[in-house]
Amino acid sequence: MEFNDNQFNQKSGPSKGRLFVFIGSFIGLVVLVAAPYYIWDNFFDAQAVSERKTQKQYEAFLEWEKKYEETMKNDTYGGKTPQETLDLFVAALQNDDLELASKYFALGDYGEVDEKWINGLYSLREKGDLVDMIVELEKMQPSFRNTGSDKVSEYVLFGNDGIVDYSVIFKLNLFSNVWKIESL
């Protein structure tokens, strides 16, 4: 029997071609099994879609909360007491600085002064009622009604009949510890 040198030089075991076919088949099988799951989970499964939507909303809320807290911490317009905030507000009105006066109002949910306060102040000035408002604000006294919180304070102006004509509600900004005008 004659032996060929090529027969002795061949390695035993699978050839490279068979190995690539095996690996390719394995990857194809994994893709074939995983792709439908991926497609179902990302596009058709209502619970998975709902959970992702909820997660995105939660992340958006956390981002809003972070920005809100930062804005509130940087809000330094106001006094250490409600009376000090009232005095600062009246002084700004007396100086006809309505932009500064508007900064003593409590910030909204997105860290901004509500336009109704700014527009209201300008409207009072246009009507010539700003001086009357200043006079009334200077007469205001702390209310003796219990607000139920040491973070809210009310100042009132009583009419001749003993009934409250006007009130100003102050609220403590817990992030910067300044008192803000909540309502007027």
Image (cartoon, rainbow, N blue to C red):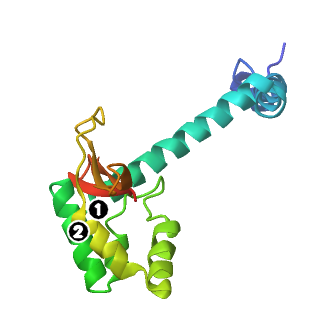
Position above or below: 41 against 110 = above
Q: Tell me which residue sits at (36%, 49%) in the image.
A: 163
User: Mark 2, mark 1: which one is toward the viewer?
Assistant: 2
Crowding at label 2, few (<14), some or many (≥20) Cα neighbours within 10 Å?
Answer: few
Q: Which mark is residue 65?
A: none
**119 vs 24: above or below:** below
Q: Residue furthest toward the top?
A: 1
Residue at the image position 23 percent from the left and 68 percent from the top: 138
**109, above or below 93, in the image:** above
Between 161 and 58, the residue placed more toward the observer is: 161
- Could you tell me residue 165's position as x and y percent? 39, 56
Q: Say which of 45 and 174 sits in front.
A: 174
Q: Earlier in the sequence, mark 2 or mark 1?
A: 1
Q: Kindly indicate the quadrant of the structure image that contains residue 89.
A: bottom left
Q: Secondary structure at mark 1?
A: loop
Residue tagged 1? 75
The residue that appears at 31% across and 77% down in the rendered structure is 100
* Vertical placement of residue 87 versus 47, above or below: below
8 with respect to 95 (left or right): right
Q: Position of residue 177 (x, y in %)?
A: 20, 51
Camera-nearest residue between 104 and 36 = 104
Q: Residue at x 72, y 18 (%)?
A: 13
Q: Residues within 10 Å of mark 1 (few under 14, many from 20)?
A: many
Residue 9: image quadrant is: top right
Tell whether 31 sits left or right of 145. right
Mark 2, residue position: 138
> Percent x, y for residue 179?
24, 55
Q: Quadrant of the N terminus?
A: top right
What amino acid does circle 2 point to? Answer: Glu
Q: Secondary structure at mark 2?
A: helix
